[in-house]
Image (cartoon, helix red, strand yellow):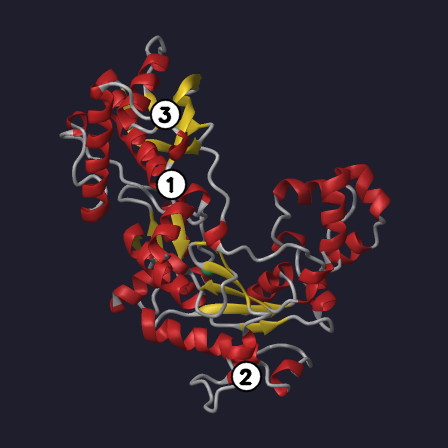
Amino acid sequence: MQQYNNRTILHVDLNSFFATSEQQANPYLRGKPVGIIKARGRTCVIAASVQAKKFGVRTGTTTYEAKKLCPAIILVEADFDKYADITYRFIKICKTYSPLCEVFSLDECFIDVTESEKFFPRLPRKPNLEESTWMEMGKSLRGVADGGNVFNIAFEIKDRLRAEIGDYMTCSIGVSYNKLLAKLAGEQIKPDGLFWITDDNAIAVLDKSELMDVCGIGWGLSGHLRKLGIGSFPQLRSKSLAFLHKHFGPWWSVHLYNTARGIDGSSVNSFLSLEEAKSVGRTYTTHRNLYKKEEVRRLMRNLCEEAAAKARAMNLAGRYVGVVLRGGEESRYGHFTLKEYIDDGKKFFDLCLQITREWTLPYVRFCGVTLGMLTKSEYLTAPLFPGELRRRKLVAALDAINNRFGDYTIYPSQLLGTSIIRPEVNGYFGDRAYRLKIMVR
Ligand SMILES: [Mg+2]
C-alpha cells in the first residue's frame, strides 16, 4: 500500500467539459452562460458553462429553473460525437507522459509520472500564462525550485490542449503523491488551475474541504457519518479505527480512516488494462408514452441491437438476458439464463420478446435490456449449421459497414421509419471503455 503514497500523480480535468466544447466550436457562445440539454424538449440541464455556473445553474437544474436563475442562458443540444472526439484527443495528449494513464471519465485522467517525469526536464521558456495564477500551493514550492519536472508536464498539457484541441479549452490540474490527493488538488482552483498537495499541506487542504468533496464519500455515507456527529475531516480523523469498524464494517472503516489522513493505496490503472465488462446493456426513457405494442417492440429491438453490437465490439458474448419495462407506476422485470452464449441483436431481441410477451402495462415510458454472464467470443463453439454460419457472417459484414461508416448506417428493417436511438457517450465510462480502447490504440 505504502508504495502508492509516494508517487507523482497528476489529475487532469477539463473545465466544464460539455459546455466548453460547445464554446470552442462556436465562438458566439464564448463568455456566455450556456446550458447543455440532452435533446430538444428535455427539461434538464446536463452541464453548464463556467458563466452559467456563476448564476447557480448546474447539472440537474431544470430548464425552467435555469431560465429563472439566468434569463440570458443559451440552451444547446448535446452533441456527444463532438465530446467523444475531444476526449479522444485529450487522452492522446495525456498518455504521451506515461503509460500509466487512467481515463476516469470523459474529461478526467490520472497520470502517474513517477518513473517518466525525468524525461520531461524543465523547459527553457516560460509557459505563456502567468505561473502564479495557476499555482496556489501555499508555501510549498519545493518541487519548482528543485526542477519540478511534473510542473513542466502540467504546463505542457495546458499549452497542448490549447494548441491541439482549441484555444478555449482549459483544464485544472492537481498534483500530489497519491490519487486521492491529486484529485482533491485538481478541485482547488477552477477554471485553469494548478494546485500541488504535498506532505506539508495535505491535512490543511483536507480540513478545509467537505467530506463529500472526496471521491468515494457519497450522499449515503456522508449521511451515515453525520448521524454519528462526523461532519468534517478533523472530526473523522478524531475517530479510532475500532469505532469506525463498529459502524462501517471492515472495508469502509479502513477506507475512511485512511481518507481522513490523505492516505490512498490505489494505483493508476492504464485504460488498456481495464477489466472486461461483466454485462452490457442499454436503457432508454422515451419522450412520450408508448401505447402501441409495435412501438415498444421497435424500441426494444433498437436497444438490443446496440447492446449486442457493444458486446461484439468487445469480443464478448453472453448467456443472461434481462429486460425491464416501466410505464406509469408499474414496472416489470424478467430474465432468461441460456445454455449457449449469444451476441446477435436479433436473437437477443427474440428472447426479450418472449420474456415480455405476457406482460400488460398501461403504456411504456422506459425500457432496459441487459446481456450478462459474458465470456470471450473466442470460447464460443463454432456454428454447426449452415444457417447459423450464414447469420454470423451477415452480422460480421454489418459490423464492418457500421464501424466504417458510423453506427446504424445499415440496420434491421424493423427499425425503418422510426427515429433511431443512437449510442450515447456518458460522463462516466462503465462499459464504454471498450470504445476508448479501440479509439486510442
Ligand atoms: Mg470536468
The residue under label 3 is: 381
Whether residues under marks 1 and 3 lie with C-beta atoms below 8 angstroms apart, the answer is no
Q: Amino acid at mark 3?
A: Thr
Q: Position of residue 74 (x, y in %)?
A: 30, 57
Q: Who's the residue at 58% across and 70% down the image?
A: 115
The residue under label 1 is: 314
Q: As drawn, which residue projects farthest toward the bottom? A: 124
The residue under label 2 is: 132
Q: Earlier in the sequence, mark 2 or mark 3?
A: 2
Comparing 236 with 152, the one in front is 152
Q: State yes or no: Cβ of the residue under disc 3 lies below 8 Å from any atom of ligand 1.
A: no
Comparing 141 with 40, the one in front is 141
Q: Who's the residue at 75% across and 59% down the image?
A: 261
Q: Is residue 429 above or below residue 163?
A: above
Q: Is residue 429 above or below residue 204?
A: above
Q: As drawn, which residue projects farthest toward the top? A: 358
Q: Position of residue 427 (x, y in %)?
A: 43, 49
Q: Amino acid at mark 2?
A: Ser
Q: Amino acid at mark 1?
A: Met
Q: Earlier in the sequence, mark 1 or mark 2?
A: 2
Q: Assess disc 1: are there few (<14), some (14-19) or many (≥20) residues with their C-alpha within 10 Å of its C-alpha.
A: many
Q: Which mark is residue 419?
A: none
Tell us which disc is closer to us: 1 or 2: 1
Q: CA distance from mark 2 to mark 3?
A: 62 Å
Q: Assess disc 3: are there few (<14), some (14-19) or many (≥20) residues with their C-alpha within 10 Å of its C-alpha.
A: few
